[in-house]
Amino acid sequence: MTGLQDRLTPEQVEEFGREMDAIRQRIVADLGKEDVDYIHTVIRTQRALEVVGRSLLFAGFFPPAWVAGVGTLSLAKILDNMEIGHNVMHGQYDWTRDPALSSQRFEWDNVAPAENWRHSHNYMHHTYTNILDKDRDVGYGILRIDPDQKWHPYYLGNPAYAVVLAFIFQWGVMLHDLEFDRIVKGERTWADTKEVRERMLRKAARQVGKDYVLFPALTGPLAPLTFLGNATANVVRNLWAFSIIFCGHFPADVESFTEEETENETRGQWYLRQILGSANITGGPLFHILTGNLSHQIEHHLFPDIPARRYPQIAGEVRAICRKYGLPYNTGPLHRQLASVAKKIVKLALPWNGRPREEKSTTLDEDRQRLAAA
Amino acid sequence: MRRLAAIAEALLTPHGMDRYLELIHPMLVRREIRGVVTAVRRQTDDTVTLAIRPSRAWRGFTAGQYVRVSVDIDGVRRTRCYSPTCSQHRGGRDLELTIKADPQGLVSRHLHTQAAPGLVLGLSDPDGGFTLPDPRPRRILLISGGSGITPVLSMLRTLVDERHPGEITFLHYANSAGDVLYRRELTELAERHPGVRIVFAYTHEKKGSELHGFFSGRHLEHAAPWYAEAQTYLCGPPALMDSVRELYDTMGLSEQLHTEEFAPPPLRLDTTGATGRIRFAHSGKEIDNSGRPLLEQAEEAGLRPEHGCRMGICFSCTKVKTSGCVRDARSGELFPDDNQEIQLCISVPVGDVEINA
């Protein structure tokens, strides 16, 4: 496998980084009313779908109403979590200074509390993207998703864990922040998680309270149907979010990195790692919105705090720059990317699949010395 | 009703009721304070006077206080402080704000040209300690200059509504007769209320009023000969504030002078031992920490962050601090958490800091 820094000369990496910075500056300078109008339209649509969906469930005795209600509520939850929640919580709209669009104040319709998620996702995952042992999103501490993860008999259950995780994904995202695997390894104590746990309990109680107690109770004799409807909508959103997110970093050919490889990285090298460690999904405009534009995972990882509606606008340019430098730009339709992820999950359940790390990989420090000598 | 609202909030978690109500109409919000502009008039070329009906969360204000007014300009919410000019005893009437268009001012110019009935503004709870004591002093002297008229006009109107039995003098400085805000209303008000005396002083004209030129002891004697037995409330441009303050100081009357600080009180800064680097993430600029407030350091680095009061009240310069620790230069309080919103004008870096600016 080609190492992170074997693809380009140090000079090329820095030139490449400057081209990325230029795109970023151009977009940041252009942010304005159009971006705000866009997110407000999405929010209005989401709130309307939610109200319609929940109202239809009051007529849940009529099967088409139940199905339509669950469908619209699922869509509402998907929009809330993906195009609104994920992106607002990334700080993509912090520049508007609207408290309702503030990354620090927004809460999403999901059991994972925003505050916990912002730390594990915005900081750990986006800073240490695909660095084994650093980015806790590599396999979520549950799965063997990278050939460089050491095999263990536990991973025989890899496909089963993945299926279960897909169905309960929001709870998985919530529990992820307990860093249970690190508690098992003794790197973190149960007491360390007190604050995180309290936030989880509070948030989960509110979410469960509304979806599984209050709304069912309001529909009176239809309570079991409403309960089932809300549960289905949550599962639909779980399956969708799981699929999109797993396609973002885990298809074949997406690379992972070691800590030593990425020590003291420059901005150009960081950009490079984001491109090598992410994959896009092709599709139409509506599809992109429903994925929260995470179908442009590459652009999102390059510029996580730029409004996601801008990613499709710059994708062509990013791709052309990748071509210019001979860099891969991993993209494909949803079914192909999903199949690639599924194949990987099954393959890596077995001990003979995978790969021991090369003993000597080049490091950025060597790179820097070469650059200094030049 | 309260129980119903609590159930509605539980049903509409995590976004809350306001986020749904505002989609029906922005003024239906229950918790947020907003105001809808109901009337607009322009008393002078460079000012605009707005009548504003506040939303249900508005709890009233005390004459002399200010509110933070927010308006979206090209997608960005901008916030500035303005003192209402109406009486604090509103009795169902609309709030009134008079805003002077500062040639450099983004928000004041926007409101001056764009404000129209129907415009919805963000409001805050009122703030500020420039208020009349309770019980009211018997004799009251109100001195203002230019747009500094706003908080003291509110005091005057409040006192009139309260049928204040003592003497009140309203001494106002303007360049010329054409620049006097509320001129007719003030004159009429004095005619109706014998205890109220209105004195205009024109700084740039030689005739046309009782007083001309800048503030002096002679002006004071003329407008309110009883000033030594009165409480004085002052708001205006720095030059006026300084000369009134100086005169009261020399007469030993400082205790009886109350001012609205539109200029910042000096921050106590100890810049020795300042360490660390400041990184402005958006521009990529990095500088050594000089120990001065972040707003000044950003400006020295050639950045132009938006700001307002420069004294920590208007929140215009609020930015997200992504990492590092800052100290509030007023209170000494430390803010060590990542991703905290801080006000650049009063925050001093303690070691390495990264700001989203």
Image (tube, coloured by chain):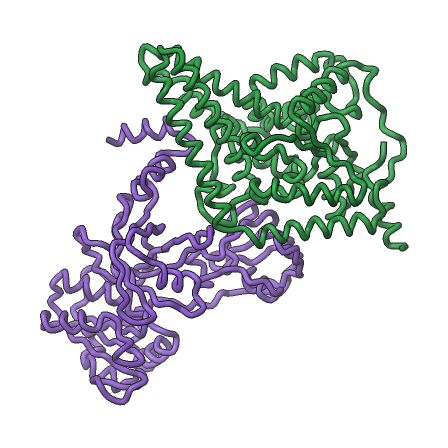
Count the numbered circles shown: 0
Q: In the image, what residue occupies the spot 33% across and 50% down? A: B120
Q: In which quarter of the image is the N terminus of chain A?
A: top right
Residue A117 visible in the snapshot: no
In the rendered view, does B253 fall on the left or right side of A107? left
Q: x, y (%) of residue A369?
A: 87, 50
Of residues A354 and B47, the one drawn nearer to the viewer in this rendering: B47
Of residues A60 and B326, the one drawn nearer to the viewer in this rendering: A60
Q: In the image, what residue occupies the spot 18% across and 75% down? A: B198
Of residues B354 and A324, the one drawn nearer to the viewer in this rendering: A324
Location of residue A157 with respect to B165 vertically, above or below: above
Residue pushed farthest bottom? B206
Q: x, y (%) of residue B8?
A: 32, 28
In the rendered view, does A351 fall on the left or right side of B265? right
Which quadrant would residue B197 be assigned to in this image?
bottom left
Q: In the image, what residue occupies the spot 82% across and 18% down? A: A353
Residue pushed farthest front? A284
What letter labels the chain drawn in green?
A
Location of residue B352 with respect to B57 vertically, above or below: below
Q: In which quarter of the image is the C terminus of chain A?
A: bottom right
Q: x, y (%) of residue B345?
A: 50, 60
In the rendered view, does B103 fall on the left or right side of A275? left
Q: In the image, what residue occupies the spot 54% across and 50% down? A: A31
In the rendered view, does B72 fall on the left or right side of A219? right
Which quadrant would residue B136 be assigned to in this image?
bottom left
Q: x, y (%) of residue B73?
A: 44, 55
Which quadrant would residue A156 be assigned to in this image?
top right
What letter labels the chain drawn in purple?
B
Residue A245 visible in the snapshot: yes
